[in-house]
Image (cartoon, rainbow, N blue to C red):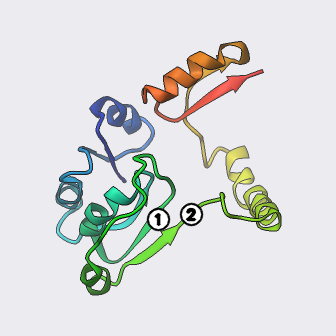
Amino acid sequence: MIGTSRSAEKLEKLKAHGLDIAVTTGVEGMGEAVKAAAGAAGVDMVVDNIGADALEPCMEAMNVGGRFCTIGRMSGVHTTEFNIDQLAEKRLHLYGVSNRLRNAAQRAESAKRFMADLLPALSDGRIRPIVDRSFPLDDIASAQDYVEADRHVGKVVITM
């Protein structure tokens, strides 16, 4: 598994959780750096939480038949231009994930699938979420500051 971040420190922490190859980069130069780390063919799948400004470099890093899944818009960039020839030549698959536009029935179905597919894996340890730090409810402002400072690796938990 290859991971990218602007923070070498975060990537180093992720190695303890199974990250094989760490690539320190921003969006600029990310495609070339990931492809160099993966080898000439590129990567089979990208899970992106950056946003539209990462689409082009991610497409560059992907293998023929690769899959791109966007799950977030952390950069705040929502639109971009990209090379449609590259999409066709590599026969790429693009997926978007968002719960914002789902109706109540779709959310209920998603919750059922989560309980059936993921809770057993969480329960038996096949999936272990990374908890970076816990804050008591009465110190929620510090938790917010910590997240906004982008110092966390994994989840920040509020205890009640």
Quarter of the view holding residue 18: top left
Please name whichever residue, 148 or 113, is drawn nearer the observer in this view of the structure. 148
Q: Which residue is mark 2?
A: 97
- The amino acid sitting under disc 2 is Val
Q: Which residue is mark 1?
A: 69
At a point 74% along the width and 52% down the height, the residue shown is: 120
Indicate the position of residue 31 as horizontal and vertical percent values. 23, 59
Indicate the position of residue 64 as horizontal and vertical percent values. 30, 79
| Tally of numbered discs | 2
Indicate the position of residue 137 as horizontal and vertical percent values. 72, 18
Is residue 23 rendered to the left or right of residue 51?
A: left
In the rendered image, the vertical position of residue 79 relative to residue 89, given as above or below: above
Residue at the top extreme?
138
Per the image, label 2 sits on a secondary structure element best described as loop
- The amino acid sitting under disc 1 is Cys
Is residue 71 rendered to the left or right of residue 136?
A: left
Q: Which quarter of the figure is the N terminus placed in?
A: bottom left
Is residue 151 rendered to the left or right of residue 26?
A: right
Q: Which quarter of the figure is the C terminus placed in?
A: top right
Crowding at dot 2, Cα within 10 Å, few <14 / some 14-19 / many 20+, comes out as few
At a point 46% along the width and 33% down the height, the residue shown is: 153
In the rendered image, the vertical position of residue 12 relative to residue 69, given as above or below: above
In the rendered image, the vertical position of residue 41 relative to residue 30, given as above or below: below
Crowding at dot 1, Cα within 10 Å, few <14 / some 14-19 / many 20+, comes out as some
**Quick check: marks 2 and 1 in contact, CB under 8 Å?**
yes
